[in-house]
Image: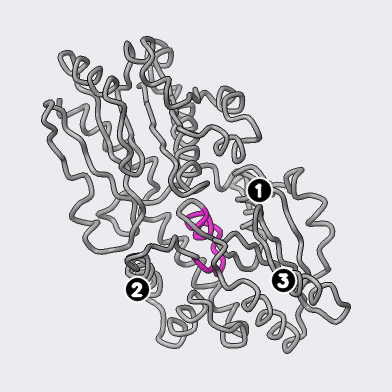
Amino acid sequence: MRWDIFCQIVDNYGDAGVCWRLARALSRLSSSSINTVSSAECDDSRIRLFCDDLNVLNVIAHGDAVAHGASLGIEVLPWSAAESPSVLASVGDVVIEAFACHLPKPYIDAMVQKASDQAPIWINLEYLTAEAWADDMHLMPSPQNNGLNKYFYFPGFTPKTGGVLLGDWYEVTSNLLTSGRVTSPPNSLSLVLQSCRPASKKISVFNYKQAPLDAWLNSVNQAALAHGDQVDVFLCADQNVSTATQKAFSLEDSAVKLIQLPFIPQEDYDYLLSVCDMNLVRGEDSFVRAQWAGKPFIWDIYPQSDLAHEVKLNAFLDRYFESSIAELRSTGVAAMKWGPASDWWPHLGALTKHSEAWRDNLMGLGHLEGKILDFVKSQEISR
């Protein structure tokens, strides 16, 4: 099975993060099924990822997406390569255009040519949403004027949608594995985790720049002091706080300690989320990873001028807290909307149990990469 994934970056690391994780997940699934297919089929297995900004992809892929991709069985290519003669002569059996990006016309023409033998399975991977309409739109075919069919694929949180990406979460985090082995910290985090104070609570921060981070951290500091807690806060990548806040948290009597981290590989970031007591995330990729972590989190959703992001956030909160008691729902929603830490700090334990239950629910729904494979197989059978 040959897969071509197309990624045009809109939201900095989020779009690239999802596409890179999907490519890795499909590569892992292909490798795990090697004993169930013939050697000829294995030789024809291929995953190509076309991206319009490899510099962004490099940041989350160990510094060199091309080299690291090759080690995982993924061919990482610039967007322009999609119009090269070699690519046009071997378009994918499955073509995934992520987040409604527009495939190059020569590539679409090559897909049409391929259809004379067997049409590629063309999937438009949409943004993740908890809105109810996604149930009806998921896997809906969209006949094209050129005779091809494109299918809308909606990730989501119900059995009728496409699930969310799991990837190698359990292999790279601190969760107890089935073998009984617990993973050790990756090299990029080993020293900083050793520098944390004994018994401190840990919070990771990866938000957009307009987030009210200074005020929020001050409220966390006050709540932690009131409860006799210490908090180590990891500022991931380009997270900035004011000079005044940095100075305040450098004092001896501060409960909060700020730890600045450089950009770390995707797998290492997953590990960090798993060991933190709370995670502040943004976009789609880190939003999903926070849910797999089974810890309380704040989703700093990408802002839109028409305030559509608020509809999307409220739809998720309705789904996320659907089964919780009214008091916990009220507390959790307030926390998610940057409410003062004094209101929710005493309830971190209850919020953690809720987050763990939500993670179990996600697993029960099935993960996105597996559901995509199931859909592709169903399309092959129906031909």
- Mark sitting earlier along the chain (2/1): 1
- Residues under labels 2 and 1: Cα distance? 36 Å
Residue type at mark 3 is Lys
Q: Secondary structure at mark 2?
A: helix
User: Magenta stretch?
Assistant: 286-299
Residue 59 lies in quadrant:
top right
Q: Identify the amino acid type marked 2.
A: Asp
Give the side of residue 298 with respect to residue 38, left or right.
Answer: right
What colour-coding does the image apply? one colour
Task: Give the quadrant of residue 141.
Answer: top left
Q: Position of residue 35 (x, y in %)?
A: 45, 22
Q: Residue at x 53, y 77 (%)?
A: 338
Q: Pointer 3: residues within 10 angstroms few (<14), some, or many (20+)? A: some
Quarter of the rendering occupied by the C terminus: top left
Residue situated in front as seen by the camera: 216 or 176: 216
Q: Nearer the viewer, residue 216 or 306?
A: 306
Q: Which residue is mark 1?
A: 180
Name the residue tied to disc 3. 201
Point out which mark residue 169 bears.
none
> Mark 2, mark 1: which one is toward the viewer?
2
- Where is residue 287 shown, x and y percent of the image? 49, 58
Mark 3, secondary structure of its residue: strand
Q: CA distance from mark 3 to mark 2?
A: 28 Å
The quadrant the N terminus occupies is top left
Relative height, residue 52 to residue 87 (above, below): below
Instruction: Identify residue for label 2.
Output: 318
Disc 3 + disc 1, Cβ < 8 Å: no
Q: Is residue 328 magenta?
A: no
Q: What secondary structure is marked by label 1?
A: loop
Q: In front here: 343 or 102?
A: 102
Q: Nearer the viewer, mark 3 or mark 1?
A: 3
